[in-house]
Amino acid sequence: MLSVMAATLNYIDEQVKGGLILPYFEDIDAEQWQEKIKVLDIYITDEVEGRELNLEARQKDYATNILSYPSDLPAAIIGLMPTLPLGELIICHAVMIREAAEQNKEAVQHISHLLIHGVLHLLGFDHELGQAEQDEMERFEIEILAGLNIPNPYN
C-alpha cells in the first residue's frame, strides 16, 4: 500500500507544481508543500466500530468503506513542524472486502482506490459538493490508478 500512497502524493505534488490549490492546505505555499514529508495515520476497523464512527462523524447509521479525518492544524503550526500531517484514514475491512466482491474487483484494486479517495478527502477534495468537484476528484483517482496499472473503478 506504500506504493499507492507514494503514487498519490507524487501525483498531487505534480499538480501543486502546476498551480493546483489544495483546499485544506491553501495557506501553505507550494514550496513548503513540496519540501515537507507528508504523514498520515491509517486505522483498520471492523463493522461495529465503523458504523459507530460513521454515525458520529457523518450521522449515517451504517459502516462505510473509508472515513477521512483531515488535519486541522493552522499553517503557522505546520510551518514549525518537520512533517506535514494530513490526517487520519479509517478503513472498515469487512465493508471493503464485501464491496470488492460485489463489484467483481480484486481487493487490492479496491483498497488502492479507497486509499487514493481518502487521501484526496484529507486534502480537501469533496465529491459531495457538486458535479464539478466530483468530476475533478474522479479524474484524479482515475489518473493515479492508471499510473499503478489499476483499471478505472467507475467503468
Image (tube, rainbow, N blue to C red):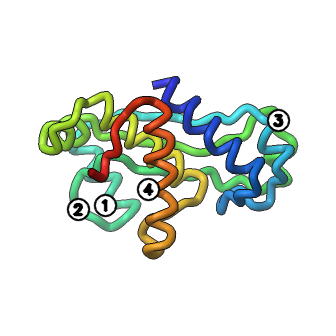
The quarter of the displayed image where residue 45 is located: top left
Q: Secondary structure at mark 1?
A: helix
Circle 1 sits on which residue? 55
Q: Please, is residue 72 above or below residue 145 in the view?
A: below
Of the residues tagged 2 and 4, which is closer to the observer?
A: 4
Q: For the residues labelled 1 and 3, say whether their Cβ atoms are less than 8 Å apart.
A: no
Q: CA distance from mark 2 to mark 1?
A: 5 Å
Decide if residue 12 is on the left or right side of residue 141.
Answer: right
Of the residues tagged 1 and 3, which is closer to the observer?
A: 3
Q: Please, is residue 26 above or below residue 15 in the view?
A: below
Q: For the residues labelled 2 and 1, say whether their Cβ atoms are less than 8 Å apart.
A: yes
Of the residues tagged 4 and 3, which is closer to the observer?
A: 4
Of the residues tagged 3 and 2, which is closer to the observer?
A: 3
Question: Residue 50, position in %: x, y?
Answer: 29, 46
| Residue at the (78%, 35%) spot, across then down | 36
Q: Amino acid at mark 1?
A: Leu
